[in-house]
Every structure is written in structure tokens, then in C-alpha cells.
Amino acid sequence: MPSWQHITYSDEIAAEHAGSIVTVGGWVQEIRNLGGISFIQLRDRAGVVQVTVLKKKNPELFKEINSLQRESVITVKGVVKESKEAKKGYEIIPEEFRVLNAAASPLPLGVVDKVGADLDTRLNNRFLDLRKAEIRAIFQVRATTLAGIRRHLTDEGFVEVTTPKIVAAGAEGGSTLFPIKYFDKSAYLAQSPQLYKQNLMASGMDRIFEIAPAYRAEASDTVRHIAEFTSLDVEVAFIESSEDVMAVAEGIVHSSLNHVAEAARRELDILGVDLSSPETPYPRITYDEAIDLLRSNDMEIDHGEDLGTEGEKLLGDIMLKKRGSELYFITKFPTSLKRGTFYAKRDDEDPELTGYFDLDYRGQEIVSGGQREHRYDVLVEQMRENDLNLESFAFYLKAFKYGMPPHGGFGFGIERYVQKMLNLSNIREAVLYPRDRVRLIP
């Protein structure tokens, strides 16, 4: 058995283990030396366990333990003893202990200190920041969210795929592409797997999804934008309209929120989040209705304009107050707003509108998509309207010549979803090592 499997986590020990010998390991959070007795708060991934050292029982061990710096890594082998003074109702009386790595002093970032630190300091010392239970809980919730999404989509017959992240052309235009040198060719980091997931709709794999990094060179210093993010991308064929695509997005959100509420109760409690999944179907309003609502609430915005950050926030407040829902769809976007998205299917009766939608959560867009244009001639014309070089999209267009069914899909921002789910003030809180306009390390 590997040695690490001999370590007992703090949450595995209970009063009924009194008298038994265990080995615990972790970081020295705090040492209180009262002269003849010392109390060590030893933190592991599950919590904190108290180690109580008596000077008269083992003077050498007592001296060595009390010389430790905070955040040093140790293992302790000892007897579990019931204790009314210890927070968990038990303590460990050590028989042996090992210093695996002594921490330097002073620490660049406090772990349990009451003095706070700004986000940049925390991100520059992320390994220490993650030793805080409330920070680690964010990423445990994130992992649970992804597990819930995967389970739901797999149960619905979707197949998980992986597409290239080094591409020859951008799916959403060149202004936000990261150019790279690919041997003797020019290439880009993928903004989206859009071209590939549509390509797969002509293959017989008619329900696919991917959870992977995506990249956008947006020079935005906001609490909702990052340059490298995790995108859930979904595509489904043989649809009738964007309503079929919206139903998939709605199912993912509803199911994953329920999964997180059940499977991540401990982490949600640590974060002080009371999570629930709103009833379905989620309310739907058209883009024009959204603009009218904003204008009636004294926002200066015209039809045809992008809602923007402030518009989305205000609309979120309105929808919560008037419809009682934190989740809602905005539908029937003007073609002028989606013009750069050359693959969007336009309304056959009114080409000035698309069937595209956004799904907003607490005043922020988390999903955007809709029915795609599957007719070759129409798609080519829309690409020309967007001044695209058709030769650069040869592999993409080829699939539309030889039997492409009606299809649609969406991109779903995982970090934005977690940010709104946990009421985080900045999207960078939902990323282990965020990348933005100024941050390249760590």
C-alpha cells in the first residue's frame, strides 16, 4: 500500500476512534505553547485536527514541535483521545512526528490571519491562498459542477469530444485571436471549437460536447473577462429550431445546480451559499422586450445596441423583481448584433433577426448560441458579407456540401457560471491561475 494511503484525514476521525492509533499529516496552522502543554492546529484538505503535546511526557518532542514555523508540513502518529476542549471533540496525543518540510518565515501571504490581502497578492501566492478552506471550496464546487454537467449530458446521449486548440482560422473573427507560430505557418489559439463541432454534425455524431480551454485576446480589465477560460461547447443535430437548443442548455443548468446543491453541501456551507435550482422552463423575453424594459427603467439604450454589462445587470434585477427568476433567456437578437457570427441562422421571414439566444444568470450572460445555418449557399453568402476568406475555411465548408443536417449549439462559460452560482465578485476567483491582459504568471 502506498505510504500516502496510511494518512488519516481529519474528517475521518470521530469519538469512537478514541484509544486507537492514527497517522495524520498536513500544515501547522497554529501552535499555542502554554509552558507545560502545547496545542497544534494541524490542517489537511478536510479540516483541522488538534495535536496536544505534553512536555513532561516527551520533553524532546515538545521542544522540537514548538520550534516549528507556521505552515510547515508534518506528519504525526499518535493516540486519539476524547477532549471537550478540542473543537471536534477529540485530540491526537503524539508518539512520533516527522517534519517533512519546514516553512520559511515570514509568509508572503497569511493563511488564517485576520488581515486580508488584495486579489493580486493572493493570486501571486495562489498555493498559499488555496490552503484557505473557503478558497479551496470554490474549486471543489467547480469540479462538482463539471461532474454534474458531464453526467447529465452523458445520460442524454451526448458524446464528449476533443478538438484542436491550435487552429488556422478563427470562428469569431480576427480581432480577438492570439496569433502563434506553428512551425513554418501562422496559426491561432482557438477562440472556440465552433468550426469543428459543426463539422462533426455531418459525421453521424449528432450529439456532442466538449469541456476545454478557449482563448480570446480581449483587452478587458473587468470582473467578468479573462483571456483563457473554460468553455462547455455543445452541438446537436436534427433540430427544428433554436428552442431545441435552449432546452438542452436549460437541462444542463437545472440538472447541474441540483447536483451541486446535493453533492457539495459541505463546500456551500463553508462559502455561506444557499443554492437552489429555479423551476423550469426559464422565462423567455425577446431582445426588443429587454430593451423596452431597460428604457422603462431609465437606462439610455436604443434598439440595435448591445445590452452591455450595465444593461445585463439591470435586466437581471428587473427579471428577479418582476418574474422572480435568476435565470432567463433573451431571444431573437438582431442580425446586426450577431453579424460577426457568420454561422448563425437568420429568421427566414425576417432576415434582420436571428434565432440566437443568450441565457443570463443573475444579470450576466453565461450561455450564447442558437440554430446554425446548415445550407451551403446561404452560409457562403453570410461569410462573404463578413469579408471572410473562403479558402481559409475550406475544411469547414466542405462538410456542408455532402449532407449537413439542421443543427445548433452553444458556448457555455464555466467560470462565469461558477462566479454567479457562488456570488463571487470577480471571475478570477473561479480560476486557479487566471490569465488576463496583464497576468501571465504564475
Image: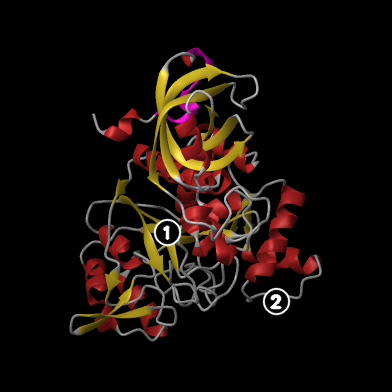
Q: Which residue is mark 1?
A: 231
Query: Which percent across, then down, holds residue 35?
Result: 62, 33
Element under disc 2: loop
Instruction: Indicate the position of residue 400 as horizontal and vertical percent values.
Output: 26, 67
Can you name the residue that lies furthest to the left here? 184
The residue that appears at 77% across and 71% down in the rendered structure is 299
Q: Are marks 2 and 1 in contact (CB under 8 Å)?
A: no
Q: Position of residue 349 (x, y in %)?
A: 51, 68
- Specify the segment rendered in magenta: 8-16
Q: Does residue 188 appear left or right of residue 340 in this picture?
A: left
Q: How is the rendered protein coloured?
A: secondary structure
The amino acid beneath tag 1 is: Ser
- The location of residue 214, given as percent across then percent down, is 39, 65
| Residue at horizontal 68 percent and vertical 50 percent from the top | 114
Instruction: Give the quadrant of residue 309.
Output: bottom right
Q: Is residue 263 magenta?
A: no
Between 155 and 58, the residue placed more toward the observer is 58
Name the residue: 35% across, 76% down: 170
Q: Quadrant of the N terminus?
A: top left
Name the element at disc 1: strand
Q: CA distance from mark 2 to mark 1?
A: 31 Å
> Left of 91 or right of it: where is 184?
left
Of circles 2 and 1, the one toward us is 1
Name the disc covering residue 194, or none.
none
Position of 72 relative to 432 (above/below) = above
Does any portion of residue 292 appear in the rendered image? Answer: yes
Front-lying residue, 128 or 422 = 128
Above/below status of 129 relative to 263: below
Dot label at residue 302: 2
